[in-house]
């Protein structure tokens, strides 16, 4: 399977200003030295608690936030080195689906106007071919042509998210960041939208970065999963390996927090103590050490490197001194 997206040592630091002259007094390391790849037509699930840097990572890959360092290659093109004009031309290859479909759709635009806009901006086709494209998009996301002249407030949350997905598909992207795309939806609607995303990935061979705080949601849709904590990836494995044999204490804690279908089933639950520390003042060494039940003196000294334990021939990377 050929690689579509390659992220190498990506960093996004936000300067913190203080004092009378607003000098830079520190750096908030929202994304710190993150590397991973996504093959064509695959979904990479990105999980972690809120505030761990997942959304910033998704936006930095699309250059909606300018990266502080590192490299992003999409289909062989170095996205990080593109100037503004070149970036506009490549924007159509990479799109985003937002968490709140209502906030991301203009309340004053009909479905037709919303879906036509990207085609008009990029001067793709004429009036007739654009309308044909809009009808095709509605069909792909399971909506009828009679919604074309309706406004966002006339739809349910699930329908609005379908419109958001149709808009993301308008320019035939190769890569989509789905940022908490189903978190605002009811559970029954969630599974419909997840099935739709899985179908798009299968039939249109689009690669997804699927961001969620919910490991149970990510499991069903992802080929590979990255677990993020305080701006760093602490474990990367195939979806099957991560659920069958989690290695990092943080991943184990996240997994044990997933509710069991049978409340009488006993599990070795690890309850995470406290909140994620402030990224302004991260702990020394391993960022998870202040909440880790297995922390050792060595964990204070330096951040453990991501190591590939390469079990059964499949890559399984973990950053922890236990391994
Ligand atoms: Fe816990 Fe140490 Fe592993 Fe960090 S490196 S997860 S503190 S055992």
Image (cartoon, rainbow, N blue to C red):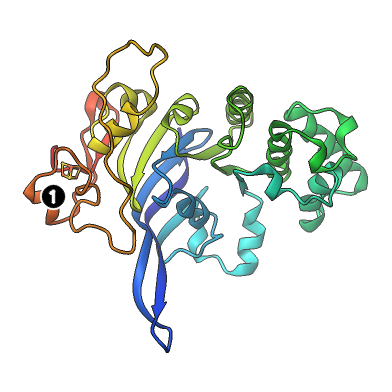
Q: Is residue 118 placed above or below 247 in the rendered structure?
A: below
State the residue in front, 23 or 63: 23
- Image coordinates of residue 39 in percent, x first then y, are 46, 37
Image quadrant containing the N terminus: top left
In this view, 166 is above or below 276 = above
Between 206 and 56, the one nearer to me in the picture: 56
Ligand 1, seen in the image, is in the quarter at top left
**Where residue 23 sits: x, y (%)?**
39, 84
Classify residue 9 as left or right of residue 294: right
- Quarter of the rendering occupied by the C terminus: top left
Residue situated furthest left in the rendering:
297
Q: Mark 1 points at which residue?
A: 299
- Where is residue 26, by image quadrant? bottom left
Residue 242 image-quadrant placement: top left
Relative to the observer, which residue lies in front, 48 or 5?
Answer: 48
Q: How busy is the neighbourhood of tag 1: few (under 14 within 10 Å), some, or many (20 plus)? A: many
Work out whether 89 lies above or below 140. below
* SS at mark 1 in the image: helix
The yes-or-no answer for disc 1 within 8 Å of ligand 1 is yes
Residue drawn 38% across the image and 26% down it: 258
Side of 161 where 322 appears, left or right: left
Please provide percent x and percent y for residue 247.
23, 32
Residue 4, x across and y down, in percent: 49, 43
Instruction: Please give the name of the residue rendered at 52% of the width and 47% of the height, measured from the top-left corner.
Output: 75
The image shows a total of numbered marks equal to: 1
- Which residue is painted at 60% across and 24% down in the image? 195
Query: Residue drawn at (45%, 55%), measured in percent from left and top?
Result: 72
């Amino acid at each position: 399977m050929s690689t579509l997206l390659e992220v190498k040592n990506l960093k996004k630091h936000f300067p913190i200003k203080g004092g009378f002259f607003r000098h830079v007094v520190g750096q908030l390391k929202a994304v710190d030295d993150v590397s991973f790849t996504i093959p064509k037509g695959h979904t990479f699930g990105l999980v972690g608690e809120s505030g761990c840097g997942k959304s910033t990572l998704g936006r930095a890959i699309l250059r909606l936030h300018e990266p502080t360092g590192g490299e992003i290659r999409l289909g062989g093109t170095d996205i990080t080195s593109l100037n503004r004009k070149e970036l506009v031309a490549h924007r159509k290859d990479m799109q985003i689906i937002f968490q709140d479909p209502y906030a991301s759709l203009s309340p004053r635009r009909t479905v037709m106007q919303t879906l036509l806009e990207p085609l008009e901006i990029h001067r793709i086709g004429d009036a007739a071919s654009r309308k044909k494209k809009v009808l095709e998009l509605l069909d792909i996301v399971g909506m009828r042509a009679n919604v074309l002249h309706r406004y966002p407030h006339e739809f349910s949350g699930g329908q609005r998210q379908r419109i958001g997905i149709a808009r993301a598909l308008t320019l035939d992207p190769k890569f989509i960041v789905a940022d908490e795309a189903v978190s605002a939806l009811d559970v029954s609607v969630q599974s419909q939208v997840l099935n739709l995303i899985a179908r798009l990935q299968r039939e249109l061979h689009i690669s997804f970065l699927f961001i969620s705080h919910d490991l149970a949601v990510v499991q069903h849709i992802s080929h590979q999963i990255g677990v993020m904590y305080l701006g760093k990836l602490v474990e990367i494995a195939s979806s099957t390996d991560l659920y069958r044999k989690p290695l990092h204490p943080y991943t184990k804690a996240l997994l044990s927090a997933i509710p069991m279908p049978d409340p009488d089933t006993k599990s070795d639950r690890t309850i995470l103590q406290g909140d994620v520390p402030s990224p302004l003042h991260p702990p020394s060494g391993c960022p998870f050490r202040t909440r880790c039940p297995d922390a050792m003196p060595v964990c204070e000294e330096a951040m453990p490197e991501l190591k590939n334990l390469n079990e059964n021939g499949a890559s399984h990377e973990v950053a922890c001194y236990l391994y």
